[in-house]
Amino acid sequence: MRKNLSLLLLSTSCLSFSTFATDNLTKKLDAQIELCQKKAENTLATVECNNQGQLAWDKRLNKEYQLLLAGQSDEFKAKLKASQLAWIKYRDSYLQAMQSFYHQQDGTIWNIVMSDAALRVTRDKAIELYTLRTSTDLTGGGG
């Protein structure tokens, strides 16, 4: 019972540190994207904000990938590379399917929805890599 309680407290602490660090990771980029979206005066401008946000998150994803690989075993590196290549295929296929779906709809709002979806898919993966990389850091420092 005591061991289970200790494990529960440890896992709760890890989740708290992880959430705090993830909030710090996302806050700056998300704020930049939101500011751009608020300034956007039309659909095209909003889509461009989302596209620029997606590129920024893709850059962050690649940074997290490189940081995660640092100092790891060859076995882990090979498995992570294989999983990332499979994720890229999934992402591309998923976004193509979504684009096909939204092109069936009337109105330019669907361009915003689609660009936002592409942004979120990339953002979510960057956060996953960051969370994996920092999951063993019990100090909450995100490093």
Image (cartoon, rainbow, N blue to C red):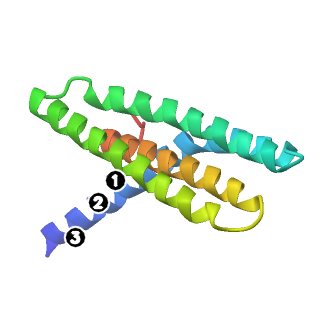
Q: Nearer the viewer, residue 13 or 48?
A: 48
Looking at numbered disc 2 in the image, what kind of residue is underneath it? Ser
For residue 65, above or below residue 42:
above
For residue 18, above or below residue 84:
below
**CB atoms at circles 1 and 2 under 8 Å apart?**
yes
Picture coordinates of residue 106 (x, y %)? 74, 67
Please tell me in which quadrant of the rendered image residue 134 appears. Answer: top left
- Asked if residue 137 shows in the view, the reply is no
- Disc 2 on helix, strand or loop? helix
Circle number at residue 11? 2
- Disc 1 on helix, strand or loop? helix
Circle number at residue 14? 1
- Asked if residue 126 shows in the view, the reply is yes
The local crowd at label 2, few if under 14, some if 14 to 19, many if 20 or more residues have their Cα within 10 Å, is few
According to the picture, the residue beneath numbered tag 3 turns out to be: 5
Disc 1 versus disc 3: distance between alpha carbons? Answer: 14 Å
- In the displayed structure image, the side of residue 143 where residue 33 appears, left or right: right
Looking at numbered disc 1 in the image, what kind of residue is underneath it? Cys
